[in-house]
Image (spheres, rainbow, N blue to C red):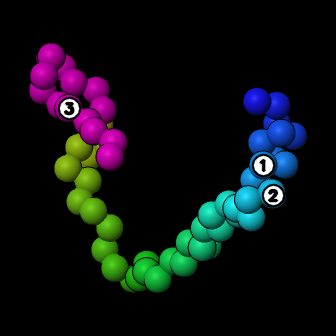
């Protein structure tokens, strides 16, 4: 069907699209809280295979 035919049919049958609510953020980070531990010590070079694995979640 053509776009305008679909638009006309939707209007003819009184249908409306879903209006999603705006996302409300309720968590506020505490700037004084300690960050995660740096277990890799920011050294991303491994001297042999499978010594250091990094993951980004």
Q: Which residue position is annotated with label 2?
A: 11
Work out how far the residue at label 1 is from the one at label 2, CA to CA, in angstroms.
5 Å
Magenta span of residues = 44-57
Residue 53, disc: 3
As drawn, 27 above or below 9: below
Q: Which residue is mark 1?
A: 9
Depicted 25 relative to depicted 3: above or below: below
| Mark 1, secondary structure of its residue | helix
Q: Looking at the image, tell me whether mark 1 or mark 3 is earlier in sequence order.
A: 1
In three-dimensional space, the C-alpha distance between marks 1 and 3, rounded to whole angstroms, equals: 56 Å
Q: Give the residue at x 87% y 40%.
A: 4
Against 16, residue 57 (above or below) is above
Q: Is residue 9 left or right of residue 34?
A: right
Question: Could you say which is closer to the camera, residue 25 or residue 44?
Answer: 25
Q: What is the x, y in percent for residue 6?
A: 77, 42
Q: Quadrant of the N terminus?
A: top right
């Amino acid at each position: 069907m053509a776009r305008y035919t679909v638009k006309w049919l939707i209007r003819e049958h009184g249908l409306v699209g879903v209006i999603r609510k705006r996302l409300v953020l309720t968590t506020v980070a505490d700037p004084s809280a300690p960050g995660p531990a740096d277990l890799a010590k920011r050294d991303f070079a491994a001297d042999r295979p499978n010594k250091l694995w990094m993951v980004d979640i």
